[in-house]
């Protein structure tokens, strides 16, 4: 059965999350969808441990901390999250509403759509070996969804970042055998994880190889072994059951490009009064929105989310005037925020 809501937000980066807050203050319900398994967009995916210095009134705030704080701030509004799935389709209905469909088969009927898709969905960088695609999610995995699927198997893990090292360490005791392959002996992962991996290699519990995968052997519709070329151009065949590939993520605009929105290269052209696109009822905020003078900063996205929320409220309830109210003093906003008593001003 399709969900029914006021607004669907495409993208759960900082600006999509703050959009929930601004809509919630005005009494509007939201569903939010992200291709990633957790909220946070670029902050969580690209620089979680780095400090941000230009969030108003927070002189220093870790990127993941910012997302944690936003999640706390939006909690009263009970937005529904649909993670680990891409919005594939936004279809306008005759009554002016939209049907939003996701790659996981979720269908949401909504009165408005806010695209907060940043630089696009983060997709895993693929292994470029001829003939590998039909084996994805059977023997070749870009994400570990169910770790037990890999227990008791001969595993090969590719990559040198945190994901590769974290999964090697998590699966070392459970796999029949495990080999980590990276193009060099320099890692981008946390030094403590690298040290643990090296200790496992020293104790003979796993193997590490420097090299690149350049080919594979298949028999009876299954990969039997991969060909690994080392820095001396020697190629070794390595038998395996499962290959886990962690080459990092790269953003792709993906299906957003097919929704008929006016695009300027990648970003969506918006008018700065409402942050509406060329399709009435579809709005854009954050990095994906463009207009003269646009700066791709989180604080710009927060401002855009506030104005988009007012515009959406006016669109959904055209007969009512949308009054500006302060969170400090508005009883209706206190009720929506779940504030029990108005705290005394300090
Ligand atoms: C290293 C680094 C440091 C930075 N430092 C600062 C700083 O100090 N101050 C500052 O203001 N900014 C900084 N930025 C920029 C800031 O991170 C971005 O402006 C901000 O993340 C934009 O937020 P967003 O919500 O618009 O998009 P994003 O954070 O890009 O999130 C967009 C989300 O949309 C999802 N998505 C896209 N398409 C779909 C789809 N079809 N279906 C489902 N999901 C989809 C993506 O998976 C993603 O999670 C920095 C950026 C980087 C890379």
Image (cartoon, grey):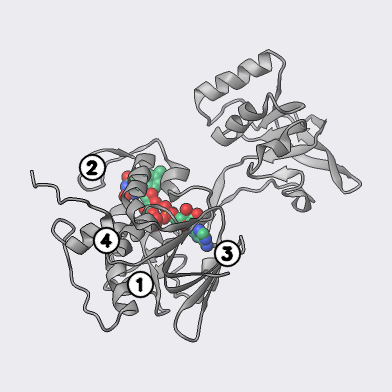
Q: Distance between the residues labelled 3 and 2?
A: 37 Å
- Which quarter of the figure has residue 302? bottom left
Secondary structure under tag 4 reads helix
Relative to 98, say whether 168 is above or below. above
Q: Name the residue under label 3.
A: 106
Q: Mark 2 or 4 closer to N-term?
A: 2
The residue wearing badge 1 is 270
Q: Badge 3: few (under 14), some or many (20 or more) residues near its Cα, within 10 Å?
A: some
Dot 3 or dot 1: first in sequence order is 3
Q: What element carries label 2?
A: loop
Q: Position of residue 66 (x, y in %)?
A: 34, 44
Tell me the residue that label 2 is attached to: 58
Q: Could you give the CA–CA distance between mark 4 and mark 1, rounded to whole angstroms?
A: 14 Å
The answer to the question of whether label 3 and label 4 lie on touching residues, with beta carbons closer than 8 A, is: no
The image quarter in which residue 117 lies:
bottom left
What x and y, as percent, mark residue 150? 72, 36
Q: Distance between the residues labelled 1 and 2?
A: 29 Å
Numbered circle sitting on residue 303: 4
Residue 96: x percent and y percent? 44, 83
Point 61% across, 60% down: residue: 104
Residue 81: percent from the left, percent from the top?
Answer: 47, 56
Closer mark to the observer between disc 3 and disc 4: 3
Q: Can residue 297 be seen in this view?
A: no
Tag 3–tag 1 contact (CB < 8 Å): no
């Amino acid at each position: 059965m399709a969900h029914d809501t006021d607004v669907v937000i495409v993208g759960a980066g900082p600006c999509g999350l703050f959009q929930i807050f601004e809509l919630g203050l005005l009494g509007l319900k939201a569903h939010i969808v992200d291709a990633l398994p957790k909220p946070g967009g670029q902050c969580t995916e690209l620089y979680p441990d780095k400090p941000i210095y230009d969030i108003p009134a927070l002189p220093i705030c870790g990127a993941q901390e910012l997302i944690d704080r936003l999640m706390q701030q939006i909690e009263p509004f009970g937005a529904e999250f649909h993670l680990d799935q891409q919005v594939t389709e936004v279809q306008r209905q005759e009554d002016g509403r939209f049907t939003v469909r996701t790659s996981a088969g979720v269908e949401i009927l909504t009165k408005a759509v806010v695209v907060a898709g940043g630089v696009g969905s983060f997709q895993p960088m693929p292994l470029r070996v001829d003939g590998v695609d039909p084996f994805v999610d059977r023997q070749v995995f870009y994400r570990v969804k169910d770790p037990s699927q890999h227990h008791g198997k001969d595993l090969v893990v590719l990559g040198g970042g945190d994901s590769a090292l974290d999964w090697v360490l998590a699966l070392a005791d459970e796999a029949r055998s495990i080999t980590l392959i990276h193009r060099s002996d320099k890692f981008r992962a946390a030094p403590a994880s690298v040290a643990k991996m090296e200790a496992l290699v020293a104790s003979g519990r796993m193997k590490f190889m420097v090299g690149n995968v350049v080919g594979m052997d298949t028999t009876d519709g299954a990969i039997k072994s991969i060909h690994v070329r080392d820095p001396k151009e020697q190629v070794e065949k390595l038998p395996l059951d499962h290959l886990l590939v962690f080459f990092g993520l790269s953003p792709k605009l993906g299906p957003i490009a097919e929704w008929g929105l006016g695009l300027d290269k990648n970003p969506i052209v918006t008018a700065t009064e409402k942050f509406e696109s060329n399709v009435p009822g579809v709005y854009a905020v954050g990095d994906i929105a463009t207009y003269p003078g646009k700066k791709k900063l989180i604080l710009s996205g927060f401002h855009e989310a506030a104005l988009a929320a007012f515009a959406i409220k006016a669109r959904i309830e055209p007969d009512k005037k949308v009054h500006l109210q302060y969170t400090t003093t508005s009883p209706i906003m206190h009720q929506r925020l779940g504030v029990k008593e108005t705290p005394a001003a300090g």
